[in-house]
Amino acid sequence: MNLILFGPPGVGKGTQGARLANDFDMAHLAMGDILRAAVRDETPAGLEAKQYMDAGQLVPDAVVVAMIEETIMAGNGHDFLLDGFPRNVSQAEALDEMLARHSLKIGRIVFMDAPKESLLKRLCGRLICRACGFGFHRQYSPPLKSGCCDRCGGELYQRDDDREDVIANRLEVYHEQTAPLLDFYRHREGFTKIDAGGEMDAVYAALKEAVNG
């Protein structure tokens, strides 16, 4: 089964997607990871993406989809979970076309949603280790020692884009871009919307039910 998992920033796509992919033996394809790997490995799409990135420009949708295509094909048909992609209707249409060329299809499309207040609380509390990049949360997964990474002892900091004013703007932009995407998918076979505003294990149980349904 191939799966699309999407929703607003802070809804838990990365955490829940990784857990789901592990339990269902699926490749977890997060766009940020794919982009970094393609550039690092100097794949054809990665090299093209790097030209735009070096120029300070957004990577075009066609190049993004090409990177996903390279990753899926490298998996020799293994089931995959797309985490946070597509982000707009243009990307969704390009993804459909690419999958059709390889006689692949999406079996489940899960939209994770949560109240704005919950998303703000999750995002504003995130802390990142400067040394190893591991993430913590002031409320949900605090470090054993304040300001210090449990894994490597590095300094923890809050990213600039995790400030409340920045996050509020990100959520507004997200909802503007995603409303058409939700309309694009909501009538597709296999589409489900789940409430991801609750406790982590309860959200995961709802996600598993959506996938198994």
Image (cartoon, rainbow, N blue to C red):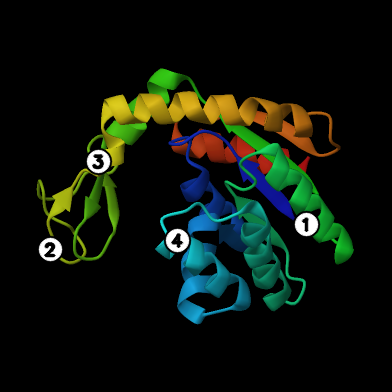
Q: Give the residue pinned by disc 3.
A: 160
Q: Give the residue pinned by disc 2.
A: 153
Depth-wise, is mark 1 or mark 4 nearer the camera?
Answer: 4
Mark found first going from the N terminus, 3 or 2: 2
**Picture quarter containing residue 154?**
bottom left
**Disc 3 versus disc 2: distance between alpha carbons?**
21 Å
**Disc 2 versus disc 4: distance between alpha carbons?**
32 Å
Q: Amino acid at mark 2?
A: Gly
Indicate the secondary structure of the residue bearing disc 2: loop
Task: Identify the residue at image location x=57%, y=25%.
Answer: 176
Indicate the secondary structure of the residue bearing disc 3: helix
**Picture quarter containing residue 149?**
bottom left
Q: How far across and how far down the image is residue 28, in percent?
A: 58, 60
Indicate the secondary structure of the residue bearing disc 4: helix
Which quadrant is the C terminus positioned in? top right
**Disc 1 versus disc 4: distance between alpha carbons?**
33 Å
Mark found first going from the N terminus, 3 or 4: 4
Q: Are marks 3 and 4 in contact (CB under 8 Å)?
A: no
Depth check: give the residue in front, 85 or 125: 85
Depth check: give the residue in front, 147 or 167: 167
Task: Identify the residue at image location x=51%, y=25%.
Answer: 114
Q: Give the residue pinned by disc 4.
A: 53
Q: Give the residue pinned by disc 1.
A: 1
